[in-house]
Image (spheres, rainbow, N blue to C red):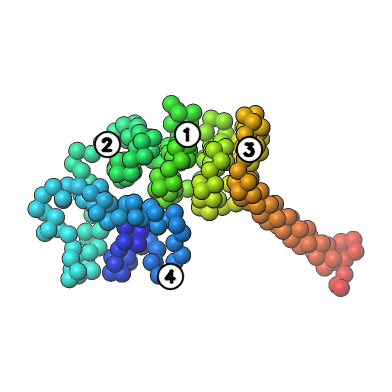
Amino acid sequence: MSLNLGIVICMECSGVHRALGVHLSKVRSTTLDKLDRSIMEYLKSVGNERSRSVWEASLMRSDASKRSRPNPSSNAAMREMFIRAKYELKSFLSPTREKDRAALHSMLFHAIEHGQLLPLLQALAWGANPSWHNPQAEQRTALHQAVMYSNQVIVECIIQHMNGELNAKELRGWTALHYAAYQNDKALVELLLLRGGSQLACELDAGGNTPLASALAQCAASGETIVAEVESLLKAAEEKVRARNREKRYGQDGADRREAICVPGKAGSGLL
């Protein structure tokens, strides 16, 4: 299957998809790889037919689809030619697709705000950049916006289409995890930590606050209480990073001590 495209592919086509590169198709095995619930929900929400309606829009409007699409008996060369034309050259996208970058970004944010998966997939396929910072929305990226609207399928879609880290910051220095923590959204906190790593929990905003510290401050100001599971997830992630940093620091100190002991000419040098 291809995670970002949200489709199931056969063994014969998977090799071509891998050759495209992960920026175009993130291939995983349905049997060898572990697929979590969020990924499965995303795959069910997209599926091959909905994906085809985006990537083969021009073909589906004519009889050319039957002649152009590979079938189970097609040879490897035909499969590769079609797949590269479809995803690399984008030859079969809608002929009426939007090409203006500003309009595409507006379409992207509109789809997120209204929870519209198909227009979102269209905007991304047509060239919208999910890492773009919206100057009209406090410099939020698509990921910030998706988390703000608490739609896990949309958040997963954005993450799968990003080729960078998930620590982009908006005007206040908040990451997407700051938003999830502030909203007391356990599912999204868990998802962001899973996809972005524990280091996300230690990202500081403009006021020097981690997502947890920022959420606790907001809760205190509003008289609300942070969800215990959210607090536990963020604390565990912070501690994991601190433990890793201690290990690195002590490991380096140990290396320095060994060097001082073993290199002739240094105080206390000699072999133990």
Q: Which mark is residue 225?
A: 3
Badge 2 is on which residue?
99
x and y percentages locating residue 80 in the rendered image? 25, 63
Nearest-to-viewer mark from 1 and 3: 3
Q: Write the residue at 63% across / 37% down.
A: 225
Q: Are marks 1 and 3 in contact (CB under 8 Å)?
A: no
Q: Earlier in the sequence, mark 3 or mark 4?
A: 4
Q: Are marks 3 and 2 in contact (CB under 8 Å)?
A: no
SS at mark 4 in the image = loop
| Amino acid type at image mark 4 | Leu
Nearest-to-viewer mark from 3 and 4: 3
Q: Write the residue at 36% across / 36% down.
A: 114
Q: Between marks 3 and 2, how big is the CA–CA gap?
A: 46 Å
Residue 48 is left or right of residue 271, and the answer is: left
| Amino acid type at image mark 1 | Arg
Q: Earlier in the sequence, mark 3 or mark 2?
A: 2
x and y percentages locating residue 100 in the rendered image? 29, 33
Q: Earlier in the sequence, mark 2 or mark 1?
A: 2
Furthest residue in direction left, as rendered: 63
Q: Are marks 4 and 1 in contact (CB under 8 Å)?
A: no
| Amino acid type at image mark 2 | Lys
Residue 257 is left or right of residue 173, and the answer is: right
Badge 1 is on which residue?
140
Q: Closest to the observer: 248 or 72?
A: 72
SS at mark 3 in the image = loop
Badge 4 is on which residue?
32
Q: Crowding at label 2, few (<14), some or many (≥20) Cα neighbours within 10 Å? A: few
Whether residue 105 is visible: no
Q: Write the residue at 38% across / 38% down.
A: 112
